[in-house]
Amino acid sequence: MDVRRVVEVWNPVGKSSGTGYLVADRLVLTALHNVLGCGGLEVRQLGAEEPKWIAAEVLWPQVPPDLEREPQADGALVRITDPGWVPPTDSEPVRWGRIDAPVVREERLGCVAVGFPRSEVRDGGRDTKEIRGHIETLTGLRSGGLITAYVDQVAVPSKPDEKSRWAGASGAALFVRGRLVGVVTTDRQRDYRGDQLTAVSVVALAARPGFATAVGELVPEDVAAADRGGAPITAYDVEVPPGVHNLPELPSPIFVGRTEVMAELERALSAESQTITQTLHGLGGVGKTTLALHYAHDHAGAHRLVWWIRSDTPELIEAGLAALTVRLRGEEASGLATAQAAEWAVGWLQTHPGWLLVFDNAEKPEDVHAWTGQLRSSGRLLITSRYRRGWICDPIALSVLDDDASLALLSSLVGDGDGDEARALADDLGHLPLALQQAGAFIAHTGITIAEYQALWRQYPERATDAAPGGSDPTRTVARIWRITLDALQEHDPRAVDILRIAAWYAPTGIPRSLFTPLADDPVDLAQLLGLLADYNMITLDRAGIGVHRLVQRVARTPSAEDPHRDQACIGEARDRAVRLMLDQLPRRPFANVAGWPTWRVLIPHVEALLRACDPVEHTADIGQVLTGAGQFLEEQGQLSQATGYFERCLAGDTRLLGEDHPRTLSSQNNLAHVYKSAGDVERAIPMYERALEGRVRVSGEDHPDTLMARNNLAAAYDSVGEVRRAIPLYERTLEDRVRVLGEDHPETLRSRNNLAYAYGAAGDLGRAIPLYERALEDRVRVLGEDHPDALVSRNNLAAAYDSVGDLGRAIPLYERALEDRVRVLGEEHPDTLRSRNNLAYAYGAAGDLEAAIQLYEQALSGLRRILGEDHPTTSLVRKNLSIARDQAP
């Protein structure tokens, strides 16, 4: 039998399809009932690369018989009339056969037929259905030229509730020992318990007028006496023994956390009478191969053949198919080249449906499609790949394990250890199955505890991610698996690898795409680069930004002398680039630039991750700037402990990198003193301010603006602890020096005048404070403008001074004006606006208008909670004021 001769016959009148067999270049043998009542027909070839419908007509019989009375006449010859028809080349002539009952000396004869499933629409999906069975010597031949074939096995039968399991096989050519002996017409399952097909014998058809003339030379051979006679082995001649497969052993009997994905895969591959291709994609090490192996082992009994093909390269795919030929043909395949053997395997798969092929770790969709395109309508195809796009199906994404599954996997490998330690290790490893298995096997092999392994992993990440325990596959480690993906990305576009190395220094989720804008030519180019990384499952993309698995990040920033993607220079360059890209995005002046706070809130998790990943010993000037900005932002937000840590680290790094007297070091010293003061730790703040001032005088001189700033800050520190007598002389000197050095109208001079007024007020000398406040406001309005933030501060401070002396008549209008201006200039949510609301509320309360005061306090508290947080000192103050006002209210 030659599968290329199998055709589908479409009857446009009956709206039904059947099967036919090309017995000559333009002549198709089929069942008569397939073409009754139809003048014009259409046929299409099964084995064609691009099957298409072509015109045909009924050639014989010219006068249809009554099939009810003569079922042995249910045969027809159809002639292809399309002038563009090209018959299959290099095809052996059809060999006709007969079953002669008197000479049959065997109990049964094997038989085979190939047909199409029934379809109710012309262009619906079709799959071949191969039916194999036997003909009994005593009962197979019936009177009138009919043959009964007993069905032993069928590839992809129709649904059980169909009227016929073999629907669509009508008209199929029935072969015995390579000879065409009959045409399948009906089956008897619907009214007979056995699976039987009825066929009209060729001998019966040849006896009817006109059949032999239409066919030409027709000499049926006795199939009982037939043998191969030296004819070449075709795909149809080789049958596979039951249970043939080449599945690798399961890497581990432990299989957890994949119930839902396994069920999804089973649903996808269980549809009836359809050739199905399904792809599993995900990050290297996420368990695609393991899942596919478990599926293949679990379902091996449901398929005629299960064959596992390594698919990393086109050469491996071809070799895997060639190995199938060797398994099926044995020594007979020894003379075939690899390409020839692979092609023979495809031919066998095309003619023996019902198999499962697994293409494991396919690098490129096109490598697999070159073969699967030839295997339509034949079986089941399961593909695993790190690449997510380009598949003909909707691929199933495989993610990391959930918490419970990760703990179950670790426990099964190492026994019942400390639950908290196991959970911490699973978090460190990002719940990646391969990493968990690698860790569990190492722990079990060495006898160490989970905590000890975690410590080793953190201290020696390169060795831990590349350590294969004894007895395991040394190539199946996290680092080596991902190197293959990086090789592919490097070949595609080296910039994609650069982005991945840089992203390794940020937080694992929500990385803004804008950080990587300088690495691409334009937004389209950046989108394509990120899409390439996502296609290989090295990153995830969503509206929140970019995500990178934390273990991918850890490996990507861990140097390895054996991995060209992770040499020390590449990783150092990626770290420095990550710092510079972050600096370019961070808004300047975090204290005052409230408009930049939303950006800070988006970036601060990535700043924190970057600073955690950078070794403090490798401090740079750029890292120092990041530490300074982050510290100032966190201090303003009331996160004083974290801000203090950043400023301490910055000072230590700047001192080591630049020296104690470098201006940047002195600025870091000042910043640290400031956060100490904000935290109420004046015992450390004041000595540090004093050292900073001493250093500024020594390095820059008495009159340098930075020296004047340092003197002002020290005065403010004295002021904050109530040492007004020490603060006022410093403030007075600073104001005098700034007038002399910077001029009367310099913003810093105006700031000094305001600070001195504040100190006078704190000392109770409101007689000197109020005129200074009035002058400071007047000068700031004149120099900076009515709406400058410093002018708004002066108006608020003057109102507070009037309030302090009980002059509410002048205080309240100023407070109201300050609030109105701050709402207009800074916005409703600015901390200074909220402070103005608190101050005005306090004045209303002092004036007896507690209802208005409570309303303002509530508005201020609500905004401060949103902006600064529940625990910020300003929030706490307003909460206290509100409580007091409510207690005082009637």
Image (spheres, rainbow, N blue to C red):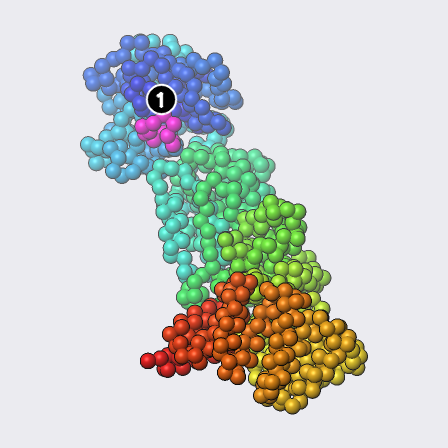
Residue at image coords 41%, 38%: 275
Residue at image coords 78%, 80%: 702
Q: Looking at the picture, how far across and down is residue 530, in whole percent?
A: 58, 50
- Would you say residue 303 is visible in this rendering? yes
Q: Is residue 761 left or right of residue 140?
A: right
Determine whether 828 is above or below 297 in the image: below
Magenta span: predominant SS is: loop
- 776 and 158: which one is in front? 776
Residue type beneath disc 1? Trp
Determine whether 308 is above or below 274 in the image: below
Residue at image coords 38%, 10%: 214
Residue denoted by label 1? 10
- 544 and 28: which one is in front? 544
Residue at image coords 66%, 86%: 728
Image quarter where the C terminus lies is: bottom left
Q: Looking at the picture, how far across and down is residue 652, in whole percent?
A: 69, 78
| 20 within the magenta span | no
Residue 1, located in which quarter of the rendered image? top left
Q: Is residue 830 left or right of residue 184?
A: right
- 1 and 186: which one is in front? 186
Q: Secondary structure at mark 1?
A: strand
Magenta span: 116-126
Q: Looking at the picture, how far across and down is residue 740, in whole percent?
A: 77, 76
Total numbered labels: 1
Q: How many residues crowd around disc 1 within 10 Å: few (fewer than 14), some, or many (20 or more)? A: many
Residue 244, located in which quarter of the rendered image? top left
Q: Looking at the picture, how far across and down is residue 612, in whole percent?
A: 60, 70
